[in-house]
Amino acid sequence: MSWRIDTQKTAVLLIDLQEKLLSVIEDRDRVVHKAVQLVKLAKLFSLPLYITEQVPEKLGLTCKEVLEEVGDTPRIWKNTFSAASVLPSDLPKTILIGGIETHVCVRQTVYDLRMREKVLYVLGDVVSSRNRLDHQLGIEEMRQDGVLISSVEAVGWEMIVKAEGEIFKKFLSILK
């Protein structure tokens, strides 16, 4: 099996990036900035994009910065901590994951999707929790269990493959 990210078999999943939740999240601005970059990369590489919202009637909608970038991409409402049960059964093999909170919804989703034999990249710069320790423990646990922890920039460079052409120019503008 190749370790390379095949854009033909990859999707992006953003979990619960809702303003009400983000208002108490450690490094909120970084998480949102990197989530927007990830959405732009998903568009550039034509990756399917899935966005969940935890009980939006109580916690509100996805933050405006992400909504502005995703356009009319439908959001999936959930009332479970794991997003796995509300995602389509025919998800691509590889999923790039960002969202909040690292140690709750992200972690539970990762473990449930592993049961569906998905290859998961948790993007450490697009996940966080209310406090740093919970975030760090969530990342550490997943890493010890063999989950791939990466970053938006690292997976972006993996997907671009070569340094030439119009797509490469657009790619560079996204990472600025």
Image: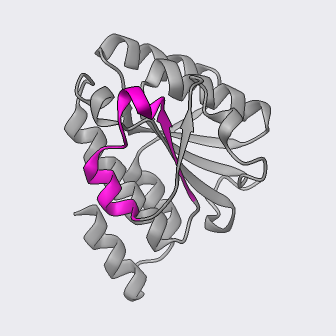
| x 39%, y 26%: residue | 58
| x 37%, y 28%: residue | 59
Question: Residue 150 appears at what percent x and percent y?
Answer: 46, 42
- Residue 133's place in the image compared with 88, above or below, is above
| x 65%, y 63%: residue | 6
Instruction: Write down the region rendered in magenta.
Output: 49-71
* Between 14 and 154, the one nearer to me in the picture: 14
User: Which residue extends farthest bottom?
Assistant: 165
Question: Residue 111 appears at what percent x and percent y?
Answer: 67, 26
Quadrant in the picture for the C terminus: bottom left
Q: How is the image coloured?
A: one colour
Left or right, 154 with reference to 112: left
- Residue 169's place in the image compared with 66, above or below, is below
Left or right, 86 with reference to 65: right
Question: Residue 134 appears at what percent x and percent y?
Answer: 39, 12
- Residue 44's place in the image compared with 100, above or below, is below
- Residue 162's place in the image compared with 13, above or below, is below
